[in-house]
Image (spheres, helix red, strand yellow):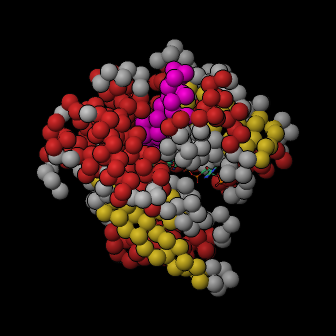
Amino acid sequence: MSEQYVDEVMALVTQRNPGEEEFHQAAREVAESVAPVVAKRPELAKAKVLERMVEPERQIMFRVPWVDDDGEVQVNRGFRVEFNSAIGPYKGGLRFHPSVYLGIIKFLGFEQIFKNALTTTPIGGGKGGSDFDPKGKSDNEVMRFCQSFMSELYRHIGPDTDVPAGDIGVGGREIGYMFGQYKKLTNTFAGVLTGKGIGWGGSLVRTEATGYGLVYIVTRALADRGEDWNGKRVVISGSGNVAIYATQKAQQLGAKVVALSDSSGYIVDDDGITLDTVKDIKEVRRGRIREYTETHSSAKYTDGWQGIWSVPCDVALPSATQNEIDGAAAKQLVDNGCIAVGEGANMPSTPEAIDVFQQADLAFVPAKAANAGGVATSALEMTQNSMRLDWSFDEVDAKLKGIMNAVYDQAAGAAEQYGKKGDLVAGANIAGFLKVADAMLAQGVV
Ligand code: NDP
Ligand code: 2IT
């Protein structure tokens, strides 16, 4: 029954969404994990819960015209996929990257449903973005783009409807420009975006949250094996928001982070990465990771981002983008003695890579659990906006830690309950699915 059910759901997904390979990949993984659960609960099959979940409640695509610094008209495409609102308003980031098309936004929006359910906070799933490339654009160009993007998006979102945030290419600067435009168009000061600046509705810890949360949950996975971070060699891909704050927390807990990357290449510093240098290059100057070697003679730069997985490490935290670890890279990590992998990025491991990790029995914390700290802290920002109160850094950090523990417990608990002890991929998918599925059953066929 299970295999046939997966085939049926996937036939629907592939027919309806031709060419959207990343979405097919994300949907197949969830279908395979939850098929045995649906088999045990016929009411879920009868109500076609998964068949409804793979169809977004609403998809918006729009033109984003803007004028560059040379006076040329540019046209980009904007997206917002409002996937599932069974347990709360649509919630999820916006990605600005030239590779963005509907299939990327759909895989991200689909995964967001289950991730958000795991956070224990009341948020549904959605995602958006554009094929706009912020790299090399002036601040004024980014502002004009963000204003044009929001000139359409504003009519679809709201603090109780849909609350976007950042993702690749969208950080504090972009959220600021979009918030300003939303406020101007609607004449309301609303908690309609998260990741806002401190002092105008933002939450302390939101900037750090995804990276910190990743390290908190991997701490649990390590502890289950009698291990901790002390003295561990850590390789982290990317050098953006997630990678920087994962580095910071891992270092605070005694680990030695030896490698970081960007889409051009990677650096290795066996003395341990000096994070202030990376923050200056990436956050202040918006430069390239290669520049690190200009001030650190102990470091070596290599062209090409894939090579980072050949760097021997105890813990790997892929925190750049989807499908960045393939089967061969996973095998290299395992052969070099890696004992734990935590996915900071969304879907960074291919299905073949996940197979390699699971066969090797290392601690593998999948993205829906591992990077849930960012969106969880976004939900805490929404709470503070509703209360018109600001919590302290320590208060939010303590709540984030509590949530990451709860995410881990739910994923590990569901895995054990459904006969897959230690399989956090199955556990996270099942626990997230059941929370949303039960809400959908209660709310009828809508
Ligand atoms: P940033 O834009 O801050 O940083 C992205 C980093 O990844 C950059 O170093 C970038 O390099 C690199 N990168 C992006 N695309 C590619 C690519 N195709 N190949 C190689 N490297 C690439 O994004 P975030 O740190 O916010 O996001 C990183 C990952 O974490 C994404 O998968 C995102 O979906 C996920 N995530 C983010 C959350 C958040 O709160 N921000 C929450 C949960 C998950 P370059 O500068 O060269 O492009
Ligand atoms: O993938 C993600 O969870 C995010 N990019 C964060 C989403 C959010 O709403 O904070």
**As drawn, 218 above or below 282:** above
Q: Position of residue 215 (x, y in %)?
A: 53, 32
Residue at figure coordinates x 51%, y 59% from the top left: 95
Q: Is residue 252 visible?
A: no
Residue at figure coordinates x 54%, y 47% from the top left: 322
> Which one is nearer the viewer's eye here, 294 or 80?
80
Extreme residue in the bottom direction: 71
Residue at figure coordinates x 37%, y 61% from the top left: 81
Q: Which residues are magenta?
A: 353-375
Residue at figure coordinates x 35%, y 64% from the top left: 59
**As drawn, 306 above or below 77:** above
Please tell me whether the stretch drawn in magenta is mainly helix, strand or loop: helix
**As drawn, 19 above or below 368:** below
Relative to 76, 260 lies left or right: right
Q: Quadrant of the C terminus?
A: bottom left
Q: Position of residue 347 (x, y in %)?
A: 50, 43
Q: Quadrant of the N terminus?
A: top left
Residue 162 part of the magenta-drawn span: no
> Which one is nearer the viewer's eye here, 118 or 346?
346
Q: Quadrant of residue 433?
A: top left
Residue 356 part of the magenta-drawn span: yes
Q: Quadrant of residue 426?
A: top left
Q: Position of residue 264 (x, y in %)?
A: 72, 52
